[in-house]
Image (cartoon, coloured by chain):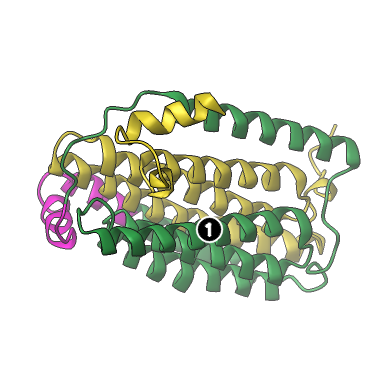
Amino acid sequence: MRLLWHAYDLEFPAGGGVEFLIPGLRHFLVLGSIVFSLGMYGVLSRRNAIGILLSIELMLNGVNLLMVAFARYISPSNEQEMAGQIFAIFIITQAAAEAAVGLAIIIAVYRQRRTIQVDQLDLMKG
Amino acid sequence: MLGTTDPFTTFVSTVAFWVTAIAIIAAAYMMVFTIRNLIRSALALTTVLGGVALMYALLGADFLAVAQLVVYVGAIMVLIIFAIFMTPGQIDVPGLVGRAQRFGALAVALVVGIISVWVVIFTPWHIRDSLLDMPTAESIGGLLLTRYVLPFEIASLLLTVALIGAIVIAREE
């Protein structure tokens, strides 16, 4: 607990009171990490292909939140902060492409096998 | 927006941050742990996506917040819900792996989460002195058409290719 307080104190040198409630870089980073690991559990624990895709979107959003928070708080210049946001925009673009192709594959698989449970798609199992 | 010296703005931002953060974590937790119905999972994910858009607004990334709303909440979620409707009989299937693998998944996710939270809290970040305080859409547009024009064109090509590929894969034989 003391260590935790020390970590906050580095960011808010004035200390005391409720200043640790004011969101800073670490708040956003912790939030992004939690969202990422929840998404990771979802990816690993689901059998439904669409459920896995939903959890991947959760992970992508966690990473994007980390990217924008880093861009805002530790990039040395305004232009580099914009670069961080542009990277986040490219990640969103890529997520859109990934969702379109992934859902198309899932629908094609459903037409063939009448299931999207990934453990029943064992055509290539030796 | 955070980073201003105005105490009232800071207060409102702080309240907005905590309400949204709790909503995001609760919705994400429910999505992976308690909800089994796919449609409800998709709605919980929509809550998370909207909350992340609000976080972008708090971080001063106004253009990104709007893009997140338009692309994720507006387009990707509709696509996912259409896909759920087009695979009937799969919505309410329990859809979880066995107990042993679930335990392994929980262990992996917990280790990753604890390590990353530990690292981001105890790393001494060099936080810049003055935070940006202006709208971002204009400079993002300028940069996308000058320095980042090649990645921009590649991204649009990628989207075209992905859409054509999705149509080819998913159409009826």
Give B6 or A123, whichever is nearer the viewer: B6
Helix or strand or loop: what does disc 1 sit on?
Answer: helix
Give B109 or B95, whichever is nearer the viewer: B109
Is residue B167 toward the left or the right of residue A18 in the image?
right
The N terminus of chain B, quarter of image: bottom left
> What residue sits 69% from the left and 48% below the top?
A42
User: Quick check: B86 above or below B150?
Assistant: below
> What residue sits 26% from the left and 35% below the top?
A74
Give B27 or A52, whichever is nearer the viewer: B27
- The image quadrant of residue B161 is bottom left
Q: In the figure, what tint was chain A given? A: yellow
Stretch in magenta: B133-157
> What residue sits 38% from the left and 31% below the top?
A9
Is residue B136 toward the left or the right of residue B125 in the image?
left
Say whether residue B169 is visible: no
Q: Is residue B153 magenta?
A: yes
User: Quick check: B69 above or below A40?
Assistant: below
Q: At which x and y percent is residue A86? A: 26, 49
Question: Looking at the magenta stretch, what is its main secondary structure?
Answer: helix
Q: Which residue matches tag 1?
A: A99
Is residue B74 toward the left or the right of residue A55 in the image?
left
User: Quick check: B16 above or below B39?
Assistant: above
Q: At which x and y percent is residue B78? A: 54, 74
Say whether residue A6 is visible: yes
Q: Is residue A29 magenta?
A: no
Q: In the figure, what tint was chain B given? A: green
Q: At which x and y percent is residue B27? A: 63, 61
> What residue sits 15% from the left and 42% below the top?
B130
- The image quadrant of residue B11 is bottom left
The C terminus of chain B, quarter of image: bottom right
